[in-house]
Amino acid sequence: MINSLNSIINKYDADPTRLMDILIDVQHKYDCISDEAVTFLADKLNLSEVDIEQTLSFYHFLSKETRGKYTVYLNNSAVAGMFGREAVAKAFEETSGCRFGEVSSDGLIGLFDTSCIGMNDQEPAAIINGTVFTRLTPFRVREIVNGLRKGLDPVDLQDVGLGDGNNNLDIIGAVVNNNIMKIGPVLSRDYKPGEAIRKIIQMSPEEVIREVKHSNIRGRGGAGFPTALKWEFCRNAPGSKRYIFCNADEGEPGTFKDRVILTELPLLLFEGMVVSGYAVGAEEGILYLRYEYKYLQKFLESILKMARRMRYLGKNILGKEGFHFDIRIQFGAGAYVCGEESALIESAEGKRGEPRDRPPFPVEKGYLNQPTVVNNVETLCAAVKVVLKGGEWYRKLGTHDSTGTKLLSVSGDCRFPGVYEVEWGFNVSQILEMVGAEEVQAVQVGGPSGTCVGPEDFNRTLCYTDLATGGSLIIIGKNRDLLRDIVLNFTDFFIEESCGSCTPCRVLTVMMRDKLQKILDGKGCSKDLEDLEDWGKLMRANRCGLGHTAPNPILTSLKNFRHLYEGLIPGKRGFDTGFRMEEALAEGRSLRLEQLKLQDHE
């Protein structure tokens, strides 16, 4: 073990800020990170064991105990539930001989729940030793587990044919489908690699920023901050170095558009990072990629190597003296909160992905305490098109306040789930018609952190001034139990993904979930609805976006579907503690009878 650990440490120059990479490699090598490994790493990296432990314990895909020779991570998102996840999970348990959260007695198979893995358009889906399986059925599960018991590699069990586009390449070899349903200016096939770089090296960095500013493009990750302002602030901030981060930690349940870009247009994304790096004066870019997309690693690394050969990356890019920029990939390890830019930076530095207090903002003091730009995948791709076609061209797309296009990840109860590129300004009804959705009860706009709207709001517009979204639209049919199947699932998701730093996020999310469960159990009262609304307001005291939006599944559904809550409260009764004397006494009587039986036996 010692030699292997030394090799892994040396691979990253014994740099403690690369702890995430080191832990991921150790996990991959030994299926766990043992106490012995923790002690050794702490000594060699000049860190305390507590430093190692706190990072290790934070991430879902890292573990101190082995999770089986074959580790199954089955998505438990609401959409997976819509399409038979319960039956699939039952089949895994029956064929593996263990329950979820356990490893089979022979140590062969471990079963674990996991949050959305970016496959909501092809559920139920799972990851087994890094191999993605989509559209699972109980029959397929039995085939897969039987194959694993025979010692087959999960890769060899993909007998349904590889996916479309680049998924079909040997270097990826995934059954994943892109499901690109509508192409617009960003996804268009007219992209020619390197054109934007050739153009910007004839411009000054300030000219590039001005062109992007004229386009009025805003961040596509959800917050919607003006992209050019972020670049300008970073360029003007004092610091010895500057960094460009691409946020590809697409953890919002129901979102998968970035996965499609990474698969089909990685050079476009990398060129966007180069453009951003030139504009702010950065020499290093980091693609922070969620662990669930690790199956794309070899492919993306090959694209980076090709970009270096073509002189799009490296020293003196395309002959521009002094223009140096390169990109490396940094993997996360399963933590939704790392989609928040400061938590992402903390994670990239080898720490727990806990959001930082702000100010200072990352553009002032970010990665390694230096000025840092964090942009979304889609934002950087759109910036390339702005550079090529001009800010004025981009302003003509979309609306006055929301220029350009938006990539939507559409899933749920519709005939044509997938990725759609539309101009800002579409309303919900138009989207539903386009994706073949009928008998719609609700649409979850922006994932769990967004807004749940009903038919009376389907005329509302997708834009920053009305229904803003990072890209996820989940369609919920009239046959679904909205509160039990969707809202409760989303609330559990936020409880699981909270970093736990802020008391409201750590405590109130659980209290709100329990209150919702009480109502679902038919034991609610009208005061419970008031409590949910009041507690939701207190969540603004949290320091990051996850904490602010964690109550949204309950609050927005309570606002727009109040009748569903009230229908579960018998007679709209008033105050009710939820305590039932007869039920409590019955439990006590049962215990007493067991005691008497034992005494008689003795």
Image: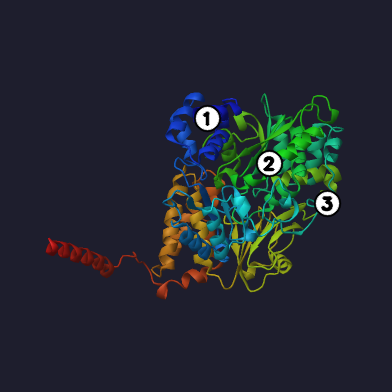
Question: Would residue 50 appear left or right of 206 to someone viewing this image?
Answer: left
Mark yes or no: residue 76 visible: no
**Residue designated by label 1:** 5
**Residue designated by label 2:** 298
Label 1 is placed on what type of residue?
Answer: Leu
> What residue appears at the point 79 percent right and 57 percent down from the top-left corner?
183
Q: Are marks 3 and 1 in contact (CB under 8 Å)?
A: no
Label 3 is placed on what type of residue?
Answer: Arg
Q: How far separated are the C-alphas under marks 3 and 1? A: 45 Å
Is residue 270 or residue 433 the one in the foreground? 270
**Residue designated by label 3:** 189
Closer mark to the observer between disc 3 and disc 2: 2
SS assignment at label 2:
helix
SS assignment at label 1:
helix
Mark yes or no: residue 349 visible: yes
Residue 437 in the image: state x and y as whole percent.
67, 70
> What residue appears at the point 78 percent right and 50 percent down from the top-left corner?
186
Is residue 55 or residue 542 the one in the foreground? 55
Q: How far separated are the C-alphas under marks 2 and 1? A: 22 Å
Residue 208 in the image: state x and y as whole percent.
81, 37
Closer mark to the observer between disc 3 and disc 1: 1
In the rendered view, tell whether residue 528 sits above or below residue 41.
below
Work out whether mark 2 precedes mark 1 in sequence or the reverse, and give the earlier one.
Answer: 1
Is residue 538 or residue 446 the one in the foreground? 446
SS assignment at label 3:
loop
> What residue appears at the point 20 percent right and 64 percent down from the top-left corner?
594
Q: Quick one: which residue is furthest to the front in this view?
A: 150
